[in-house]
Amino acid sequence: MTSSVEGTPRPNGQGLTGAQPEARHPSSGHVPSRPAGARSVARPQRSVPTSADPPAATNADAPTPHRQKPLVPLLAESPAAMVSFAFGCPSFEDLARLKRSNSEVWVTVTTVDEARQAEDVGADCLVVQGSEAGGHRGGFTDDHDGLGLLALVQLVRTATSVPLIATGGIMTGAGLAAALAAGARAGALGTAFLRCPEAGTSSAHQEALARDDRPTAFTRAFTGRLGRGIRNRFLDEHTAAAPTAYPQVHHLTAPLRAYGRSIGDADLINLWAGQAYTLASDLPAEEIVHRVATEARTALEAARQLLG
């Protein structure tokens, strides 16, 4: 990791999955939160530049609980500008250690209770994921579909005081404007970038995204954890019997999914996509960011005029 950090020209974020499901605040001690670097602009979900020239960082993957824990000391020694957690809340001790290294800590939440728990352990920012989002649900548990984004942002904004990043179903500037008006500091877009030339999305997945004849649905069939994707034969045939067994199911289906991608068979792969995926375009990512930001300003100004 050290050599990767030294060779990284610009800062980025470190995302950890599989955090411990329960995080308890100790009876004494407090680590002050420093202001989150979130700004009210549309950004790709995994790009988190927070200033012109902070320490460089590296990205690594921690897809299972037993691999997540050792990364915290590594990140404390080679700090990233921002460390984000999904699939669970970091412990107070881990979060405090990262903060002592001047890393912001973001936590993905899907309920008000999760938001309160993340704030209690000192999270700098909450990534509020609505049920419209494509891909895995990023919350602490895997036993619910959850609320839509606008309802959830309003509820979390009322219940917490830390900055919020809204994600789930945002594909246009109007969608971003709605999230900002509901109380978010910024919006995180994922599906909106899947058709970009830079995305590296498989050809079969790209073709499925370009069509508009299939709805999305939740499934555990591909990975053993709830995720939203475009319906295909594998999803329809195996969702009902799929167990809650992540990452075991993920490893079990990996060869099949790899084969499906290699032959371009969209019925064999996880076509992760949010509910509004038909609005995705094949423009370069930079153009999408500028377009969404411009549309959001226009939408907010139109709303202001309507209100007089």
Image (tube, rainbow, N blue to C red):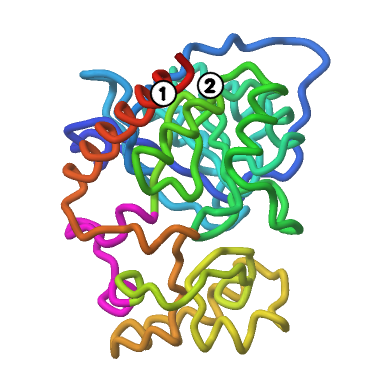
User: Which sits earlier in the primary sequence, circle 1 or circle 2?
Assistant: 1
The residue that disc 1 covers is: 38
Magenta-tinted stretch: 191-207
x, y percentage for residue 182?
56, 28
Residue placed most toward the observer, 110 or 307: 307
The amino acid type of the residue labelled 2 equals Pro
200 is within the stretch colored magenta: yes
User: Considering depth in this image, is 22 or 39 the residue closer to the camera?
Assistant: 39
Quarter of the figure that contains the C terminus: top left
The amino acid type found where label 1 is placed reads Ala
**Percent x, y of residue 104:** 47, 23
State which quarter of the image contains the N terminus.
top left
**Mark 1 nearby-residue class (10 Å; few <14, some 14–19, many ≥20):** some
Q: Is residue 67 above or below residue 149?
A: below
Q: Which mark is residue 163?
A: 2
Residue at image coords 72%, 75%: 243
Q: Residue at x 63, y 45 (%)?
A: 19
Residue at the (51%, 72%) spot, across then down: 215
Q: Is residue 184 magenta?
A: no
Element class at badge 2: loop
Q: Residues within 10 Å of mark 2 (few under 14, many from 20)?
A: many
> Looking at the image, do the residues carrying marks 1 and 2 touch, with CB atoms under 8 Å apart?
yes
Indicate the quadrant where residue 290 lies.
top left
